[in-house]
Image: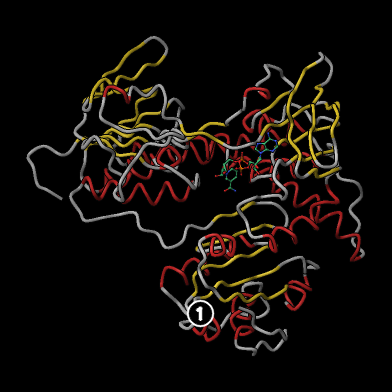
Amino acid sequence: MTTTAEPIHLAVLGAGPGGYPAAFLASELGMKVTLIDTEENPGGVCLYRGCIPSKALLHVARIKQEVHEAAEFGLHFGTPEIDLDALRDWKRRVVAKLTGGLGTISRARKVEYVRGRGRFVDAHTLRVANEGELVEVAFDYAIVATGSSPAIPGPLRVDSPRVWDSTDALELREVPARLLVVGGGYIGLEMGSVYAALGSEVTIVEMTNGLLPGADRDLVDVLRKSVAPRFKEILLGTRVTNLEDTGSEVRAALAGADVDETRAYDAVLVAVGRRPNSAELGLENTKVVVGDRGFITTDVQRRTAEPSIFAIGDVAGEPMLAHKATHEARAAVEAIAGEPSAFDAAAIPAVVFTDPELAWTGLTENAARERAIDVEIVKFPWAASGRAVTLDRTDGLTKLILEPGTERVLGAGIVGVNAGEMIAEATLAVELGARADDLRFTIHAHPTLSETVMEAAETFFGQSPHYLARRRR
Ligand code: NAD
């Protein structure tokens, strides 16, 4: 870091999983840091109304499902009763604990926390508004980490307490008898699962011909088979073209391969994607360039076209994932400190927290096909995993995507319980340039689900003790 009489003053706009790690690291590196956010504490959408509250609710959904499945093993708990007030309060406590903890850490790291909505006045000044009060923050450098918001297309933008975005759905105001979920992506499947567990009759409508359009089909097939019985219907190749609140219900116009009619629901969750929060930041007062889809254009250090301003996280491009933002934060802060840092990840894991979970990292089979990359693919079905059998959760698949000739691990996909935890090993393998041999010669504890990663590698060489399959190209 350059030694100057005065420390660098860094302003970080947005205190989510991009912004708060950036602020904390900058403070560790000796910068004077101002962190700006509308909420009382750091945390952003992820902690307040995204990743964390949704996972708390999905944990409850999983327990309810397990109680149901336990009857199969002769364990009877009776019918679960859901106390919605208590559940809401538990979710609130989870969020308060984590965001409050970040507030404490922020103070301990001597980060100045300014509450309010910030706007750039020029390339070195932010004006922060909070309930009529204006604070000016002058900075040497700024990092924009303002995240994203739900994108609601025109015909689905209905001002009604029955038409929800993900934030509304997480509030758990009620459990509608009939819930329509528009979008079979991350949010639609995760929140659809929560409401199905709470007792709603859930219909999922997805415009493309499959759930989770970005994920490999063989993984999605396993997921779909497991979750389908928990939903009333999954309508693929179907669009919701209009929503109308009649005062007592919502009438949804569905247009698709199997259905072309208007149906009534008690609530509708619209989860058709998110858009970057790059408007209304005063970026026009700087040289920052915003691309067609609203993402701020940056280089590998996350520097924008304005030398004093960096951008990280959802606002700086896809994938819109918290952990990507956190790692971009490091690249940007180190670059500001004068280090030759860059965001250059070989693999960014993605996890859909359904039950079973679905995760992938590095190159997917879909992407290999689209980009005409020659790969070797090997799969290990969980029916051959002893651990999966003891859990009665053989609805899983572990697959490796390998480079022909070198057998280097280019990517992996896992569907199954705890896939979200297991994908870390595969991500490390991709980052380290590990080969299938490295995975098969690494001793994995028995009996664990992690063995499926090792056994997928063994299968590649035709040497899994539990599964016989021909390798395919
Ligand atoms: P998404 O992109 O994951 O899914 C949206 C789905 O809606 C797509 O499958 C799309 O084909 C479909 N769709 C679009 N328009 C439609 C229409 N009119 N009718 C029917 N279907 C339609 O988006 P999301 O679920 O809203 O989530 C947004 C982003 O938030 C994700 O891309 C992800 O980056 C992030 N997120 C991540 C997690 C996680 O990491 N577990 C969880 C939630 C959200």
Q: Nearer the viewer, residue 299 or 194?
A: 299
User: Where on the image, by quarter, is ligand 1?
Assistant: top right
The residue located at (57%, 64%) in the rendering is: 369
Q: Is residue 197 left or right of residue 403?
A: right
Extreme residue toward the left, this view:
5
Image quarter where the C terminus lies is: bottom right
Asked if disc 1 is less than 8 Å from ligand 1, the answer is no
Q: How many marks?
A: 1
The x, y position of residue 445, in whole percent, is 61, 79
The residue located at (41%, 29%) in the rendering is: 278
Residue carrying label 1: 404
The x, y position of residue 99, in whole percent, is 49, 37
The residue located at (92%, 64%) in the rendering is: 74
Q: Nearer the viewer, residue 419 or 79?
A: 419
Q: Is residue 9 left or right of residue 370?
A: left
**Quarter assignment of residue 242:** top right
Is residue 133 positioned above or below 439 on the image?
above
Q: Is residue 126 left or right of residue 318?
A: left
Please tell me how crowded label 1 is: few (under 14), some (14-19), or many (20+) other residues with Cα within 10 Å.
Answer: few
In the rendered structure, which amino acid carries the disc numbered 1? Pro
The x, y position of residue 472, in whole percent, is 64, 80
| SS class, disc 1 | loop
